[in-house]
Image: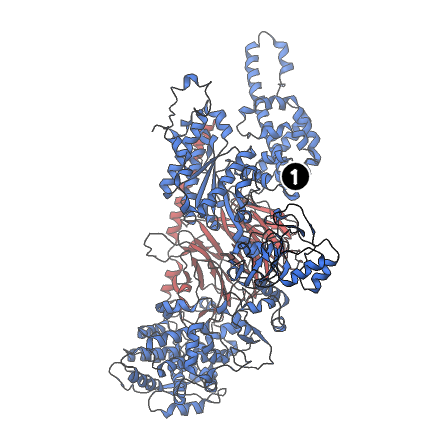
Chain colours: A blue, B red
């Protein structure tokens, strides 16, 4: 054996001593002397199973297609006992079995050479596409895999010699013939009803030398399962061959045949694949490429070729095959083994049953619970709804507890497994998904809802199947389905409750409870059981008030209201405060992204929104703690800035004094020494030490690290420092300190309180604090708009509105990364709110490269890059122009044209200026308003030039809750308009553009 | 000294630095007589040949409902954690392809995840600027969610990447959009060292990726939007050991070569490069000419080395996933052309600890496990 091997391997390649020791690590390439010749690309060989092949002179069987004929010579094989027999069968044919088959078929099917190719390829690599098979094959050979490539139509001799030169190639060759041997067997047996047994017999023989089998080692390696590597690889090709044979025998169009066989192989090989069969039908080119040799099937999978087709084709083929290949009743669908008594798991969609060996392969990773891979994404069999989430013993045995738990969770909670809304009719009207959500998430939902037709009495909450008496009293006042019809419960008593003719048993109940039912009355029953006659005002009594009612109901099997019934109907339609199942979350949630350049006030808007819409507890305890620390460290920072300023002022005044002194020197020598080192900005030595320490900490950059410990230690010192005259004097000159932010004064005024350990930030404090969290990362909040006074009347009927939850996501511009790299994470956003600070037009910031840029221009640049980001193609944008109050303050002093982008701001107001002080705002907008309109137009034009669409603009002053509320409600409107766009006239939105006409350009 | 004067001097100094850098680059190119591929060719090396069966998809991990952004294997090779845009971390059993944990995250915008060396906990980070640690053994709360066992907060920007220090369950290194990398003590939640940031010689833009040297866990390398990769010693936080220039775009991903002497980078300029840690030289560029109509170069999103280092797996933003022969710098396989390949961009790659399998995560919401075929159990 060794000699044989060494003759096949080139010189210099070490011969593996035993299969187990072989480790073909490419790391070896780093060691050893460089070789002067090409290293052979030998596919390692299983020594025990090497069949050798002798080449027979190729007999030209056809002009078109001359196939090499190789008579397989099998090496003595200790493992494969069946070889001799197979060999005999194979050599019964005079020529190579492959060619025989091929030409037989060719004769029958006419001049389509695709078939032979298909044959060989299915035998070899499951390549097989009717056309261009030759090229494919040569590809295979070029790839050097050499596993099973054989018999190419044209230029066969060359290929042949190639293959022969290569050791592994030869192997491959003979393998090919091995394969075909088996094929011939199959053909001898004839017809489409290929016995299972045959396939099985063939398989070990086949597996004998096939290089492919080795390739599958990987999966076995990865795989705890039982299958032997050899058989798994070997069998599949044979299965494929049979497949194509079938088609030949049925004289199907060959192309079809090949597609089918590919499909089958595809399904076979990809019991874990999610691809749909349809794709493959439409795209034959694609699978020609994609189909490769590898499968991960068990040896027994031979016959699952039939079963694993997509629904349509599968049936067709099964019919063709006849009864012979049908699975036994009670056997596993994949391996056809076992009987009724063996444990099996059924697919919850198609009810195929799999034994424990096959279930994991057939169902893959079960993202939607126990479904075959091909059934993923399909709604479940309704009769199996009961068993959702109930695990069988078999799964428990196969998988660990955590895995089972995850599968069951997925099964219960994944969206496709939920009840289909369009299968449920309430009062004759098909439900939409939102209505179903409402129905199922109400406090008192109908139990075990099944597809069907139901009636629902919205006033009293009675619920029943159409044509039947009520079976349940659910929450009333749900906005689902249509209006109830009189014959909903198919009653014939002429007594009506809430416009429904009641059934006999209900009437009995009413009579037993003592309700007067004479004269066919029309009752009006409320959810709490109080009833009145139609058209009358006075309540006649309570049905549920009497003790015996429930007993009577029980006897007549009528429903009684549950204890948890929520009597007030108003809250029912409100989903906000209720936990929503995960699968519903994304449907009901409208995501809004809030972003803008740094310092534009997005964090204030976000916090304001929290205070506005998270009414009872806007900030959790953790958040408050976080913000507290942030405020405290910020206050220390502000103090540090003050101290720095203080030092600067001290130096300046000392300089000045010195100058003065030098002038006064001659007049007054005596006084100089007393004043020498003291100015109004000097601080005492103890405070000096503290301030030095503080400045040092600030410079080192870990101010946060000293909290909260600092508050305990230094609170008294801070107090002392703040009250120090030097600091106060500095504070008075705070406008000269560039570093000090505007909000600093708000906190510095309260610095004594804030620096205490027991300080609790108020909402106002939180609003003023810089940022939301200390990390300044992404922040998001879920909210819904509470019904405000003005839309009370018009929108109560809008039931979808109450279902809508919004998520406001605030991201710092820096948090999106360089060039907004991470915007792609926000593809499910519905609306982007971009915030711009109106007061930025005269401010400058460092753009990172050392040069200063106008903040408004920086904002514009960010806006451009976000708007034109591919992720936000066709996205709606709302621009919030923030800090209007600051603009008002500033605009009179600093002209808007300070920013070069606004250099053509030239409001026509010369003729108004004379009576500016007296006129009303309406007729004559103030300069700041004009500036706002102007900026809005600027951005709109920019947006339009970038996207060709309209930009929505809103004005806000983040300190004022009302303006933020207005802006966010505007956002809500935009989302709504977006949905009903076609009904919308563009005029509604453009109230700003009319204003714009007053500008001259 | 006035501000203007200072500025002038600063500009002058910057110019000098750039000139010096240029000279250094020139000197380097002079010294570089060959690259790996040239040498390998001169030695008669030929590319690894890949048959159609040599790398095959053997498992598909389905269950995420959003784009998969990150994955990590346990050292003991049979479990994978993956992070997705659906706001969940999923822990998979790679052998059965089943989920063992599905962790709902407090912040859905997750960008990275990592398995601890002992396999007991997972870490993740994202746009919330926090690195969250979940202990897989802790009991679930009433909603069935696994509680966060530790929040590592302190970054001022998104957490782009995190990796546990090998064999130390208590130490973790993160990289962040705030231009720093941080070494954390997981048990206390404290920052042990900050690399970059205040200190000079740190990155000057968002750090996107870190990789810790497998053979010397004191060294790690980081890749950043400033188009450089930097080598750090965890014992010396104050400065980078070495800065590696060469890329012309963001360095999206870095990965140490298995021998710990080199590392690979993948960049927005569409190339992968191999750098030598000790000499600071670039050893090889892995670049494939793309004939894209719009001239857009596909970015490298993620890279991984095979266990011997002979193969470099590189995923690109155009859904390609090339297998490079690191020696001859030739593409030997494109995962996209294989059966069962991903339908979306591959965002993350990872090799199991024993090198026998490759896991890929993609925008098509699936993860796939590829195993080496033939008798090449590992390459």
Q: Quadrant of residue A497?
A: bottom right
Q: Quadrant of residue A697?
A: top right
- Extreme residue toward the front, this view: A519
* Number of on-image labels: 1
Q: Quadrant of residue A752?
A: top right
The picture places residue A837, in percent across and down from the top left corner, at: 48, 33
Secondary structure under the numbered disc 1 in the rendered image? loop
The picture places residue A847, in percent across and down from the top left corner, at: 45, 37
**Front residue (pair B262, A279):** A279
- Extreme residue toward the left, this view: A63
**Front residue (pair A408, A536):** A536
* Residue A403 visible: yes
Q: Chain of mark 1?
A: A
Q: Is residue B291 left or right of residue B87?
A: left
On-image quarter of the N terminus of chain A:
bottom left
- Whether A349 is drawn above or below A51: the answer is above
Q: Is residue A978 left or right of residue A56?
A: right
* Residue B307 visible: no
- Residue at image mark 1: A707
- Whether A688 is drawn above or below B199: the answer is above
- Extreme residue toward the top, this view: A667
**Front residue (pair A884, A864):** A884
The picture places residue B220, in percent across and down from the top left corner, at: 53, 53
Within 10 Å of disc 1 (Cα), the crowding (few <14, some 14-19, many 20+) is some
The picture places residue A953, in percent across and down from the top left corner, at: 45, 37
On-image quarter of the C terminus of chain A:
top left
**Front residue (pair A445, A1000):** A445
- Whether A679 is drawn above or below A436: the answer is above
């Amino acid at each position: 054996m060794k000699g044989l091997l060494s003759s096949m391997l080139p010189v210099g390649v070490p011969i593996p001593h035993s299969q187990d020791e072989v480790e073909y690590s490419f790391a070896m390439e780093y060691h050893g002397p460089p070789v002067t010749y090409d290293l052979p690309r030998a596919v390692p060989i299983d020594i025990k199973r090497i069949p050798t092949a002798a080449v027979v002179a190729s007999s030209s069987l056809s002009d078109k297609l001359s196939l090499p004929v190789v008579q397989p010579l099998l090496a003595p094989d200790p493992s494969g006992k069946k070889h001799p027999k197979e060999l005999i069968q194979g050599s019964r044919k005079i020529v190579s079995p492959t060619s025989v088959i091929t030409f037989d078929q060719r004769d029958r099917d006419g001049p389509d050479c695709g078939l032979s190719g298909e044959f060989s390829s299915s035998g070899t690599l499951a390549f097989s596409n009717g056309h261009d098979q030759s090229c494919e094959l040569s590809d295979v050979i070029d790839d050097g895999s050499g596993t099973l490539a054989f018999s190419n139509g044209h230029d066969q001799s060359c290929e042949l010699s190639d293959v022969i030169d290569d050791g592994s190639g030869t192997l491959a060759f003979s393998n090919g013939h091995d394969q075909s041997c088996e094929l011939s067997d199959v053909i001898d047996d004839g017809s489409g009803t290929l016995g299972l047994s045959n396939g099985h017999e063939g398989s070990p023989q086949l597996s004998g030398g096939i290089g492919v089998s080795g390739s599958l080692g990987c999966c076995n390696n990865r795989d705890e399962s039982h299958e032997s590597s050899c058989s798994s690889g070997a069998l599949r090709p044979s299965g494929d061959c049979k497949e194509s044979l079938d088609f030949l025998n049925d004289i199907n169009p060959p192309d079809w045949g090949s597609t089918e066989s590919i499909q089958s192989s595809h399904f076979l090989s990809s019991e874990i694949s999610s691809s749909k069969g349809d794709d493959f039908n439409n795209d034959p080119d694609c699978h020609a490429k994609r189909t490769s040799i590898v499968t991960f099937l068990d040896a027994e999978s031979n016959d699952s070729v039939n079963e694993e087709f997509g629904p349509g084709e599968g049936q067709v083929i099964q019919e063709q095959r006849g009864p012979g290949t049908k699975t036994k009743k009670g056997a596993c669908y994949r391996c056809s083994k076992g009987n009724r008594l063996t444990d099996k798991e059924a697919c919850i969609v198609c009810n195929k049953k799999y034994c424990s060996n096959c279930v994991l392969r057939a169902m893959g990773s079960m993202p939607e619970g126990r479904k075959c891979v091909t059934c993923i994404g399909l709604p479940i069999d309704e009769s199996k709804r009961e068993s959702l989430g109930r695990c069988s013993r078999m799964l428990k045995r196969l998988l660990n507890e955590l895995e089972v738990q995850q599968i069951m969770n997925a099964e219960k909670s994944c969206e496709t497994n939920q009840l289909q809304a369009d299968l449920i009719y309430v009062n004759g009207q098909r439900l939409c998904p939102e209505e179903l959500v409402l129905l199922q998430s109400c406090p008192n939902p109908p139990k075990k809802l099944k597809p069907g037709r139901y009636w629902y009495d919205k006033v009293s909450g009675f619920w029943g199947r159409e044509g039947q008496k009520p079976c349940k009293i659910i929450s009333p006042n749900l906005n689902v389905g249509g209006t109830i019809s009189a014959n909903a419960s198919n009653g014939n008593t002429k007594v009506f409750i809430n416009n429904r003719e009641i059934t006999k048993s209900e009437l009995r109940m009413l009579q037993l409870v003592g309700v007067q039912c004479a004269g066919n009355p029309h009752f009006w029953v409320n959810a709490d059981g109080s009833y009145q006659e139609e058209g009358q005002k006075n309540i006649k009594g309570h049905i549920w008030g009497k003790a015996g009612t429930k007993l009577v109901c029980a006897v007549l099997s009528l429903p009684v209201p549950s204890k948890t019934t929520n009597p007030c109907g108003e809250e029912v339609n409100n989903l906000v405060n209720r936990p929503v199942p995960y699968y519903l979350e994304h449907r009901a949630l409208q995501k809004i992204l809030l972003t803008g350049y740094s310092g534009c006030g997005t964090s204030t808007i976000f916090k304001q929104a929290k205070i506005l819409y998270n009414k009872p507890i806007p900030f959790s305890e953790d958040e408050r703690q976080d913000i507290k620390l942030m405020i405290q460290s910020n206050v220390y920072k502000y103090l540090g800035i003050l101290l720095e300023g203080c030092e600067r002022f001290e130096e300046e005044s000392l300089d000045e004094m010195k100058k003065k002194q030098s002038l006064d020197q001659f007049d007054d020598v005596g006084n100089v020494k007393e004043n020498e080192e003291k100015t109004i900005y000097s601080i005492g030595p103890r405070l000096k030490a503290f301030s030095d320490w503080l400045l040092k900490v600030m410079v080192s950059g870990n101010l946060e690290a000293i909290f909260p410990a600092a508050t305990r230690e230094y609170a008294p010192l801070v107090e002392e420092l703040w009250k120090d005259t030097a600091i106060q004097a500095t504070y008075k000159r705070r406008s000269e300190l560039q570093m000090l932010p505007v909000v600093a004064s708000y906190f510095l005024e309260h610095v004594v309180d804030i620096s205490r350990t027991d300080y609790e930030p108020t909402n106002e404090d939180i609003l003023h604090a810089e940022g939301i969290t200390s990390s300044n990362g992404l922040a998001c909040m879920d909210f819904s708009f509470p019904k405000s006074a003005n839309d009370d009347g018009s929108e109560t009927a809008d039931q979808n509105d109450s279902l809508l939850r919004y998520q406001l996501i605030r991201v710092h511009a820096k948090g999106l990364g360089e060039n907004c790299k991470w915007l792609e994470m926000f593809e499910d956003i519905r609306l982007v709110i971009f915030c711009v600070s109106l007061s930025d037009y005269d401010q400058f910031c460092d753009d990172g490269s050392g040069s200063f840029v106008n903040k408004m221009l920086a904002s514009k640049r960010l806006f451009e890059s976000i708007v034109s980001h591919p992720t936000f193609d066709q996205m709606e944008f709302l621009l919030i122009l923030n800090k209007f109050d600051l603009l008002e303050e500033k605009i009179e002093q600093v002209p808007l044209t300070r920013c070069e982008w606004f250099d053509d701001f030239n409001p026509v107001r010369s003729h108004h200026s004379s009576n500016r002080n007296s006129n009303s705002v309406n007729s004559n907008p103030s300069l700041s308003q004009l500036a706002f309109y102007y900026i809005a137009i600027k951005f709109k034009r920019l947006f339009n030039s970038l996207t060709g669409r309209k930009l929505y603009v809103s004005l806000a002053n983040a300190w004022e809750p009302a303006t933020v509320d207005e802006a966010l409600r505007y956002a809500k409107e935009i989302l709504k308009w977006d949905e009903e766009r076609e009904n919308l006239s563009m005029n509604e939105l453009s109230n700003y553009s009319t204003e714009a006409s007053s500008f001259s350009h | 000294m006035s501000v203007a004067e200072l500025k002038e001097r600063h500009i002058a100094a910057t110019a000098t630095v750039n000139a010096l850098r240029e000279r250094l680059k020139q000197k380097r190119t002079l010294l570089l007589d060959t690259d790996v591929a040239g040498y390998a060719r001169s030695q008669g090396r030929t590319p690894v040949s890949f048959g159609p069966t040599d790398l095959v998809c053997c498992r598909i991990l389905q269950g995420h409902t959003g784009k998969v952004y990150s994955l990590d294997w346990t050292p003991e090779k049979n479990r994978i954690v993956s992070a997705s845009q659906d706001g969940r971390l999923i822990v998979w059993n790679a052998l059965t392809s089943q989920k063992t944990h599905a962790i709902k995250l407090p912040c859905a915008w997750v960008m990275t995840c990592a398995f601890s060396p002992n396999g007991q906990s997972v870490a993740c980070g994202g746009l919330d600027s926090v690195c969250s640690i979940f202990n897989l053994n802790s009991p679930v709360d009433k909603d069935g969610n696994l509680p966060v066992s530790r929040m590592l907060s302190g970054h001022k920007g998104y957490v782009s990447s995190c990796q546990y220090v090998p064999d130390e369950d208590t130490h973790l290194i993160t990289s962040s959009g705030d231009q720093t990398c941080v070494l954390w003590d997981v048990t206390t939640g404290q920052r042990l060292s900050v690399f970059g940031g205040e200190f000079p010689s740190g990155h000057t833009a968002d750090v996107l990726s870190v990789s810790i040297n497998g053979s010397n866990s004191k060294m790690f390398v980081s890749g950043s939007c400033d188009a450089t990769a930097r080598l750090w010693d965890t014992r010396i936080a104050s400065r980078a050991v070495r800065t590696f220039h060469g890329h012309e775009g963001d360095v999206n991903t870095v990965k140490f070569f298995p021998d710990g002497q080199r590392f690979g980078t993948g960049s927005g300029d569409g190339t992968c490069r191999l750098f030598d840690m000790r000499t600071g030289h670039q050893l090889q560029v892995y670049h494939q000419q793309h004939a894209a109509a719009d001239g857009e170069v596909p970015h490298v999103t993620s890279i991984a080395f095979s266990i011997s280092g002979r193969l470099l797996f590189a995923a690109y933003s155009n859904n390609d996933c090339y297998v490079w022969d690191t020696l001859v710098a030739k593409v030997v396989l494109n995962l996209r052309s294989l059966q069962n390949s991903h339908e979306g961009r591959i965002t993350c790659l990872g090799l199991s600890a024993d090198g026998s399998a490759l896991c890929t995560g993609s925008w098509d919401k699936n993860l796939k496990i590829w195993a080496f075929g033939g008798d090449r159990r590992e390459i």
